[in-house]
Image (cartoon, grey):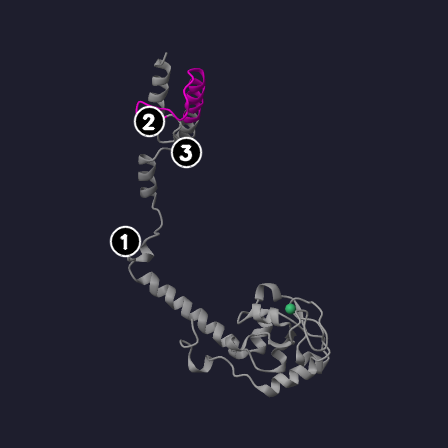
C-alpha cells in the first residue's frame, strides 16, 4: 500500500525545522538512546554519530510533527526502525519524549491505544489500511481461482456427513494404516537380516531393483517379492 494509493488527507506528514530544534533543545541532556538504551555524550550517540530526533510514530505513517511524538535515538536505531512502528518491542516501554521533559511527566508508556490517541491521522491511516485489506480479501474471495476456475469461497466448503462416509469407504482406516506400517517395518528388518546372512551388498542390483531402495509404505507387494526372492537364493 504505497503512498501514491493513499487519499490526499492521509499523505505523509511534513517535517518542520522549528519543531526539530525545539525537541533538540529539550532533549539536550538526555544522553542515552531510547531504543537500545546505550549511553553517548552531549554530542554523539553510542555509535559515534550525532544524535537524531526520532519520531515515535514515523512521519511516513502520518505521525504528528510535534514534540509529543519526538524522542532521542542513536542513528543506528533510527535507521533500523525506518518507517516501522516497532510495536512488538516498544509495547509497554517507557519513552522520554521532548514534551514530557517540558511537562516533567517522566515520559510516556507506549501502547497502541495511546499513540493512536496522540496521532489522530495515524489512527485514520491504520483504519483506512485495514478497510482496504478487508475489501481486497472480499474481492479475492469473490473472484474465481485461476488454477481451478472455481469460486474461491467454495474451495474449502465444509465436509458433509455424506462426503465423510464416502471418504471412509475408499480410504484405509487409521488402524489399518498402523497395521500396514508394522508389517512393512517387519519385512524391512527381514530383508536386512537376509541380506546380511546371504552376503549381498546393499548396492547390488539384482533382478532389476535396488536392494538399498527406500521401500516405503506403498511397496508392500514389492517387499514381499523381495523377501521371497532373497529366501530362494542359495
Ligand atoms: Zn540506539
Image point 67% across, 72% down: which residue?
45
Is 225 situated left or right of 63 in this image? Answer: left
Residue 137, position as x, y percentages in the image: 38, 64
Mark 2 touches mark 3? (CB < 8 Å): no
Mark in front: 3 vs 1: 1
Is 39 situated left or right of 53 in this image? Answer: right
* Location of mark 2 (residue): 209
Mark 1 touches mark 2? (CB < 8 Å): no
Q: Within the magenta stretch, is there residue 234?
A: no
- Which region is colored magenta? 184-210
Mark in front: 2 vs 3: 2
User: For residue 94, which quarter of the picture?
Assistant: bottom right
Mark in front: 1 vs 2: 2
Vertical order, 199 against 136 (above or below): above
Residue 148, position as x, y percentages in the image: 27, 53
Front residue of this view, candidates 189 and 122: 189
Mark 1–mark 2 Cα distance, whole angstroms, equals 38 Å
Mark 3 surroundings within 10 Å by alpha-carbon count, few (fewer than 14), some (14 through 19), many (20 or more)? few
Q: Earlier in the sequence, mark 2 or mark 3?
A: 3
Which structural element holds mark 3?
helix
Mark 1 surroundings within 10 Å by alpha-carbon count, few (fewer than 14), some (14 through 19), many (20 or more)? few
Mark 3–mark 1 Cα distance, whole angstroms, equals 30 Å
* Location of mark 1 (residue): 148
Residue 223, position as x, y percentages in the image: 36, 24
Amino acid at each position: 500500500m504505497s503512498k501514491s494509493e493513499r487519499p490526499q488527507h492521509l499523505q505523509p506528514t511534513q517535517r518542520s525545522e522549528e519543531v526539530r530544534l525545539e525537541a533538540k533543545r529539550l532533549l539536550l541532556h538526555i544522553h542515552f538512546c531510547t531504543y537500545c538504551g546505550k549511553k553517548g555524550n552531549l554530542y554523539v550517540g553510542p555509535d559515534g554519530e550525532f544524535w537524531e530526533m526520532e519520531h515515535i510514530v514515523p512521519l511516513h505513517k502520518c505521525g504528528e510533527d510535534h514534540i509529543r511524538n519526538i524522542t532521542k535515538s542513536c542513528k543506528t536505531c533510527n535507521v533500523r526502525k525506518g518507517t516501522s512502528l516497532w510495536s512488538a518491542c516498544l509495547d509497554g516501554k517507557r519513552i522520554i519524549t521532548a514534551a514530557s521533559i517540558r511537562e516533567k511527566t517522566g515520559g510516556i508508556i507506549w501502547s497502541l491505544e495511546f499513540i493512536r490517541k496522540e496521532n489522530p491521522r495515524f489512527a485514520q491511516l491504520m483504519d483506512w489500511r485495514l478497510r482496504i485489506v478487508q475489501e481486497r480479501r472480499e474481492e479475492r474471495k469473490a473472484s474465481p481461482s485461476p488454477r481451478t476456475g472455481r469460486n474461491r469461497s467454495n474451495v474449502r466448503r465444509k465436509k458433509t456427513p455424506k462426503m465423510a462416509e464416502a471418504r471412509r469407504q475408499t480410504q484405509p482406516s487409521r488402524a489399518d494404516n498402523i497395521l500396514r506400517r508394522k508389517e512393512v517395518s517387519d519385512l524391512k528388518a527381514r530383508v536386512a537380516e537376509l541380506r546380511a546372512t546371504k552376503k549381498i551388498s546393499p548396492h547390488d542390483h539384482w533382478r532389476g531393483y535396488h536392494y538399498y531402495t527406500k521401500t516405503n509404505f506403498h511397496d508392500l507387494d514389492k517387499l514381499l517379492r523381495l523377501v521371497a526372492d532373497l529366501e530362494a537364493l542359495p
